[in-house]
């Protein structure tokens, strides 16, 4: 086949390059704290985008993403911690083979985290996706809790409730955002393929989809497994971002965080997930001030850890009641849309901009 | 070889027997009407043939292969397509996308090669796109290709549903009330349309329809169901003069007197 390179492909390539250059520059010139926030933005983007693949595009509401992220996080931690570190940390019970000798370089580990999480996703999705609606929610939530509790109760494998500490950091800012770009590329390409049409058909009308020959179960599991892969990678990045993992980091609060981002950004919009992940990440740092002790009308209020979660709950409630479309609804960023937008702003050449390229 | 062979088909929902002991066959290329009063089990028969209901007893064979316990998507892949009584288009997607979904089951390319847009995938999709556009052209829908399916007029939506079903490349098409909700002129148009697609696509047709004009005009053979049982079978003239059929439709003779 002939490779035809379109102008928009070049623009996208330039945008990717720009993202990598900017993050590389910021990595060297910003302080440690802003760089951490930008990293977390990237990680949250991966989580939100992979949740959208299952929820926004396939119409399957899963509450299991915290458990999946935990799998990725633990795989990375166990693989990158040195045997000596593990020997010292496992005070409840000594680590069993092969945990006690396992040591894998960072990049293969990241892939391994994705693959293992995808396998776990397959094992969860297999039974759970045969259910519908509320039952699917409860089943995936149950699996997520099972994973978390299993980690908390396996002292010889993952150090149980003590968790793992001192996870080494290998990634830098451009690397995280490089992974974000790869994730978004894969998800957008999948959604815009024949498979994506099948997923949307399932979301819109399962019976009609089945009648035109779409294999429901296969496609639901496909979406869930692809989503799991990227959630695993995000979980792995999250572990080395925190430099520690323990089961308490992956409770349902983690999943609700993802859902808040997705609702905020618009359930059908990958673009929205990038924006919402940014807003959510920055807000959750900024809102730490409501947790500080403060004086309101002369009344002294002691510090309340977790108060910002309350703000997020209120925000989620408000969004669902009054602004269900979120920031972007199901519209996506496109170069053509941008051209039209700019033409509208400057008031010139609208009709030319609207014309389709090619 | 029969296009479709239904043998002693029964289905019970709890205590209710919706269809009992139904047997009939369709010869290839035949166009057969399935009629009966409301609640006589016509749509239930369709749901069993297309795999949405599993019959309690009996067999369904398509081109000499059993399809009795298959899933709907498998049956569609074998060559039976259906349209629904209620409009079940993917309303928020474009007309072209609706038809392209019908081609998805023939795609022989993994999700990975779809993500990477490998030649194997792009070639197949290009072919599917061409076929879909041809189908839209043939059915007079091509000018709407990029419109949202839900924005089409009702008659066009019914046609689009047929187009989507044809995209799965069926040999047997089950039409559940294609003329429902259409105006008098649109009904005539739909009849022509049905006969045209049967000829163009070499289809066997089984048609459920309430509009007697449609059934009597285009179906040389008619089956009549009442309370889930076949009460008559024959040409339109035979059916129209069959006392059992008249009784089923109009009730007891005394009630129908004036």
Image: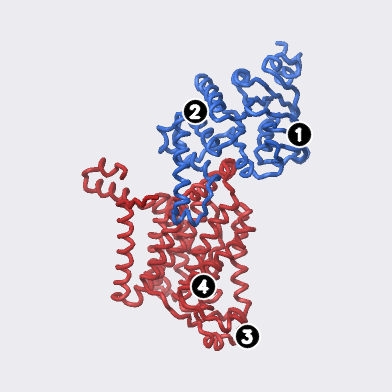
Chain colours: A red, B blue
Dot 4, crowdedness within 10 Å: few (<14), some or many (≥20)?
Answer: many
Q: Circle 2 — which element?
A: helix
Residue at mark 1: chain: B
Side of B174 relative to A55 (left or right): right
For the point 55% across and 64% down, the residue is A118
Q: Position of residue B131 (x, y in %)?
A: 47, 38
Q: Which residue is mark 3?
A: A93
Q: Residue at x 56, y 84 (%)?
A: A101
Callout 1: helix, strand or loop? Answer: strand
Residue A36 drawn above or below residue B133: below
Along the horizontal axis of the image, is A134 left or right of B193?
Answer: right
Q: Is residue B35 left or right of residue A215?
A: right
Question: Dot 3 lies on which element?
Answer: loop
* Residue B74 location (% of width, % of height): 63, 44
**Mark 2 — residue?**
B155
Report whether mark 2 lies on the same chain as mark 4. Answer: no
The 10 Å Cα crowd at callout 3, few under 14, some 14 to 19, many 20 or more, is: some
Q: CA distance from mark 2 to mark 4?
A: 55 Å
* Residue A73 image label: 4
**On-image quarter of the C terminus of chain B:** top right
């Amino acid at each position: 086949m002939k490779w035809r390179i379109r102008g928009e492909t070049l623009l996208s390539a330039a945008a990717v390059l720009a993202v990598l250059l900017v993050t590389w520059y910021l990595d060297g010139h910003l302080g440690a704290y802003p760089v951490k926030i930008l990293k977390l933005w990237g990680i949250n983007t991966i989580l939100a985008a992979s949740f959208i693949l299952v929820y926004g595009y396939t119409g399957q509401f899963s509450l299991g993403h915290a458990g999946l992220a935990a799998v990725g996080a633990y795989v990375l931690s166990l693989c990158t911690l040195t045997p000596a570190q593990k020997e010292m940390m496992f005070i409840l019970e000594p680590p069993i083979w092969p945990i006690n000798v396992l040591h894998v370089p960072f990049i293969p580990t990241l892939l391994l985290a994705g693959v293992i999480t995808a396998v776990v996703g397959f094992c969860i999705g297999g039974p759970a996706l045969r259910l519908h609606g509320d039952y699917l929610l409860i089943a995936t939530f149950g699996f997520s809790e099972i994973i978390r509790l299993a980690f908390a109760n396996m002292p010889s494998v993952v150090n149980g409730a003590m968790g793992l500490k001192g996870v080494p950091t290998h990634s830098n800012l451009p690397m995280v955002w490089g992974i974000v770009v790869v994730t978004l590329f894969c998800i957008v390409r999948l959604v815009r393929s024949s498979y994506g049409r099948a997923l949307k058909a399932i979301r819109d009308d399962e019976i009609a989809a089945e009648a035109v020959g779409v294999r429901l179960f296969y496609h639901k599991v496909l979406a869930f497994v692809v989503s799991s892969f990227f959630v695993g990678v995000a979980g792995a990045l999250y572990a080395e971002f925190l430099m520690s993992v323990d089961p308490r980091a992956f409770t349902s609060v983690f999943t609700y965080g993802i859902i808040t981002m997705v609702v905020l950004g618009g359930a059908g919009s990958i673009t929205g997930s990038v924006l919402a992940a940014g807003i959510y990440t920055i807000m959750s740092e900024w809102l730490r001030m409501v947790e500080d002790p403060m004086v309101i009308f002369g009344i002294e209020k002691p510090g309340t850890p977790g108060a910002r979660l309350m703000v997020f709950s209120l925000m989620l409630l408000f969004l669902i009641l009054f602004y269900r479309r979120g920031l972007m609804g199901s519209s996506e960023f496109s170069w053509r849309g941008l051209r039209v937008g700019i033409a509208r702003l400057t008031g010139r050449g609208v009709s030319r901009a609207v014309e389709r390229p090619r | 070889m029969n296009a479709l062979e239904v043998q002693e088909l029964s289905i019970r929902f709890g205590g209710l027997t919706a269809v009992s002991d139904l047997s009939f066959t369709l010869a290839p290329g035949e166009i057969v009407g399935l009629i009966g009063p409301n609640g006589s089990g016509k749509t239930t028969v369709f749901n069993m043939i297309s795999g949405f209901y599993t019959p309690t007893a009996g067999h369904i064979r398509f081109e000499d292969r059993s399809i009795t316990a298959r899933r709907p998507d498998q049956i569609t892949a074998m060559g039976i397509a259906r349209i629904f009584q209620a409009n079940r288009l993917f309303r928020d997607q474009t007309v072209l996308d609706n038809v392209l979904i019908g081609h998805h089951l023939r795609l022989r390319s993994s999700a990975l090669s779809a993500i990477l847009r490998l030649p194997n995938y792009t070639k197949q999709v290009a072919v599917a796109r061409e076929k879909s556009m041809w189908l839209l052209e043939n059915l007079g829908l091509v000018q709407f290709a990029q419109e949202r399916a839900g924005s089409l007029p009702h008659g066009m939506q019914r046609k689009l549903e047929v187009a989507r079903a044809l995209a799965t490349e069926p040999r047997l098409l089950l039409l559940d009330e294609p003329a429902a909700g259409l105006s008098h002129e649109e009904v005539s148009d739909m009849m022509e349309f049905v006969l045209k697609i049967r000829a163009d696509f070499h289809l066997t047709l089984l048609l459920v329809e309430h509009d007697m004009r449609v059934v009597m005009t285009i179906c040389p053979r008619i089956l009549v169901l009442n309370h889930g049982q076949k009460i008559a079978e024959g040409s339109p003239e035979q059916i129209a003069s069959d006392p059992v059929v008249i009784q089923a439709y109009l009730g007891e003779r005394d009630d129908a007197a004036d």
